[in-house]
Amino acid sequence: MRVKDWLGSLLAPKVKAGPPTALSMRDPEGWSRDDIWSGEAVTAERALALSAVWGCVNLLAGTIGSLPLMVYRKNGEDRTVAADHPLYRVLHDSPNYDQTAVDFWEYMQTALELWGNAYARIERSGDKITGLIPINPMRIAVRRLTNGKIEYSWSEDGRSWRLTDEDVFHVRGFGGGPLQGMSTLYFGRQAFGHAVAAERASASTFKNGMRPSVVLRFKNWLKPDEREIAEKKLAEKLSGAGNAGRPIVLEGDTEVTPLTLKPEDAQLLETRKFSTQEICTIFGVPPHMIGFTEKSTSWGTGIEQQTLAFQKFTLRRRLKRIEQAIAKQLLTPAERARGISVEFNMEGLLRADSQSRARFYQTMTQIGAMTINEVRALENLGKVDGGDVPRIQMQNQPITEADNADQTERSDPVDQKPR
């Protein structure tokens, strides 16, 4: 599948597979409308058309997709980047021929946020994993075989696939069992349906210029020909947008009374605000992070505090799911025993805040936790001579000489001049 196909594959024609179960991620169009109280069909396309859903999914998938996914090797007490490991290129650079790492992980996280499951077909060359090809979660069916393995079957591009868990990478979302995670589209269908209904009502109101019509009052009962003139000719002059400002001539005690409908009176704005807050609650995203700032807190002051809170309460569990799924399914037991691990680099979230980053580097170098060259590496700068030696704050000298310098200072008496 090429790049242009991937962008629309989540919303491509779906495969019907019977009535959905509570954990189903099958096509919402197959659900009975009686199961959705608003009467609105909830699909991925309709859900993403809501600005709050688009904002939450875009924020989560975009943030996770932009974080570097690193492969590490532990040697004793030291941990270094295992750039020579076959998985490093696949996870960090390019999982397949068509996608970058950002494209791939955004796709996978979008599938997780909407359907609660993300799948990718594993490509191998011998024993080495050489690629991950994403699978549209709407097309796939999962079942447990009698031998205990999990089977994944789907059809795509005129080809049918039937593979086991040895050849399919599966990240399960919230509340998932061995076969599936819980579908956000399914369990949030009432909130999404309510939001779609509110959007439809709001659009209909604005389409009519916030005024349903005007009232024409006549003193006497109208004759059939007079009623026809009032309903057709006068109505066209009074309601057509192109007639704005055009003078109207009325006869025979005709009185025109405009009817106005304020959005606050219809509670349209309040309903839409409530829907936005509900959707943010479903995805665990603070409303202010998708631009909804009314009556919301900022989780502390400054970008750093907001980022740390978002990282702790929203991103951490999502990143852990991916990291542990990779360790369990893509690393062999021998590699895990040798200290190979996979982890997202969270330092990228603070790169936009230079002041906070500078304070962090200053503290870490002053206590000897980081060297100057380690700081320079994070800033994409080259090494400097002597930059690999840890230092502490006292006189900014090598930590290995701190005790010696302290003893020398205590043993040399200070010359005191006589009074």
Image (spheres, rainbow, N blue to C red):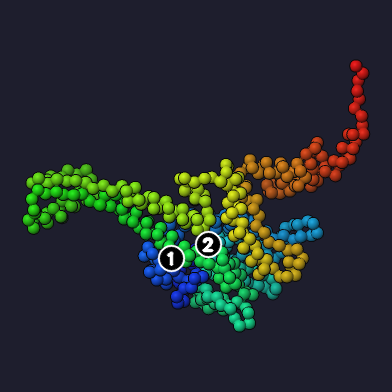
- Image height check: is 44 above or below 377? below
- Image height check: is 131 above or below 50? below
Mark 1 to mark 2 CA distance (whole Å): 14 Å
Question: For the point 73% across and 45% down, which residue is it?
Answer: 364
Question: How far across and down, in percent of the image, does residue 383 sit?
Answer: 75, 47
Badge 1: residue crowd in 10 Å (few <14, some 14–19, many ≥20): many
Question: Is 290 in front, or is 285?
Answer: 285
Which kind of residue does numbered mark 1 sit on?
Thr
Q: Which residue is mark 2?
A: 113
Q: Is residue 418 visible?
A: yes
The image quadrant that residue 245 belongs to is top left
Horizontal side of 253 relative to 157 (left or right) equals left
Question: For the point 31% across and 55% down, which residue is it?
Answer: 204
- What secondary structure is marked by label 1? loop
Question: For the point 46% across and 76% down, which residue is it?
Answer: 17
Question: Is 143 in front, or is 110?
Answer: 143
Which kind of residue does numbered mark 2 sit on?
Glu
Horizontal side of 71 relative to 174 (left or right) equals right
Disc 1 or 2, which lies upstream in sequence? 1
- State the count of labels: 2
The image quadrant that residue 255 belongs to is top left
Q: Which residue is mark 1?
A: 43
- Image height check: is 269 above or below 18? above
